Image (cartoon, rainbow, N blue to C red):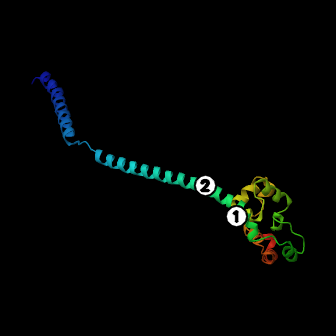
């Protein structure tokens, strides 16, 4: 028996099987792989995006028109109010006698210190923040009140302004007896 020929076949057969397997694998892989075409879906999303952009542009246009109308309306309203000299306070004029009767002391108009929990320093902080009347404080959110307090440092952060807008609303509406009763029933103006 010739071992030399046997040695060649030991190398040749596995090499041929490997080459044939590689070629078959390549051909099978190429024939089974399909390209996914997402062009239609991509175009659909592009259409939706352009519609949304058009809606956004239309809303922004309406917003600009509304803002312009609001400014024009505010100017007209301000002019008519000036001409008629009607003020919000004229609706609920300040009655110093009623306030004094309810609190037993003289109360100055729009003195924020009438609100339980607001002292001279806090009143000054609110005045510096542009909140100078009971009506303005009544329309201020509790979160905004807390921001004003936080601006004063750690010493003022501990105050709880939760009831301040409600108390100042009673003051702005001239509900002195109601405000005094509420303050008597609550511990230092806390809810």
Query: 119 and 72: which one is in front?
Result: 72
User: Residue farthest to the top?
Assistant: 4
Checking the image for residue 139, the label placed there is 1
Q: Which mark is residue 11?
A: none
Residue 166 relative to residue 9: left or right: right
Q: Residue furthest right?
A: 105
Res. 94 image quadrant = bottom right
Query: Would you name the residue on which mark 2 appears?
Result: 72
Disc 2 on helix, strand or loop?
Answer: helix
- Spatial distance from mark 1 to mark 2, Cα to Cα? 23 Å
Please give left or right for residue 64 compared with residue 29 in the image.
right
Residue drawn at 48 percent across, 54 percent down: 59
Q: Is residue 61 visible?
A: yes
Q: Is residue 69 above or below residue 178?
A: above
* Residue 120 percent coordinates (x, y): 86, 60
In the displayed structure image, the side of residue 6 where residue 178 appears, left or right? right
**Farthest-out residue, left:** 1
Q: Which residue is found at the position 54% from the left and 51% from the top?
A: 64
Which quadrant of the figure has residue 38? top left
What is the quadrant of the N terminus in the image? top left
**Sequence-first tag of 1 and 2:** 2
**Nearer to the camera, 158 or 146:** 146
Q: Tell me the quadrant of the picture where the C terminus can be found.
A: bottom right
Q: Is residue 140 visible?
A: no
Q: Residue 66: x, y in percent?
A: 55, 55
Residue at x 14%, y 21% (from the top left corner): 4
- Camera-side residue: 157 or 111? 111
């Amino acid at each position: 028996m010739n071992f030399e020929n046997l040695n060649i076949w030991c190398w040749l057969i596995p090499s041929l099987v490997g080459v044939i397997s590689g070629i078959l694998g390549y051909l099978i892989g190429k024939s089974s792989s399909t390209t996914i075409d997402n062009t239609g879906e991509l175009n659909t999303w592009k259409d939706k995006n352009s519609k949304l952009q058009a809606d956004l542009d239309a809303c922004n246009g309406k917003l600009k028109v509304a803002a312009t109308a609001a400014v024009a309306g505010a100017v007209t309203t301000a002019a008519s109010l000036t001409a008629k000299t009607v003020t919000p306070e004229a609706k609920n004029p300040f009655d110093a006698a009623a306030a004094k009767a309810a609190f037993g002391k003289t109360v100055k108009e729009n003195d924020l210190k009438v609100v339980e929990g607001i002292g001279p320093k806090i009143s000054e902080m609110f005045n510096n923040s542009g909140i100078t009347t009971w009506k303005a404080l009544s329309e201020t959110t509790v979160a905004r009140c807390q921001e004003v307090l936080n601006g004063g440092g750690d010493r003022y952060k501990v105050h709880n302004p939760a009831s301040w807008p409600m108390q100042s609303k009673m003051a702005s509406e001239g509900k002195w007896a109601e405000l005094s009763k509420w303050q008597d029933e609550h511990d230092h103006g806390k809810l």
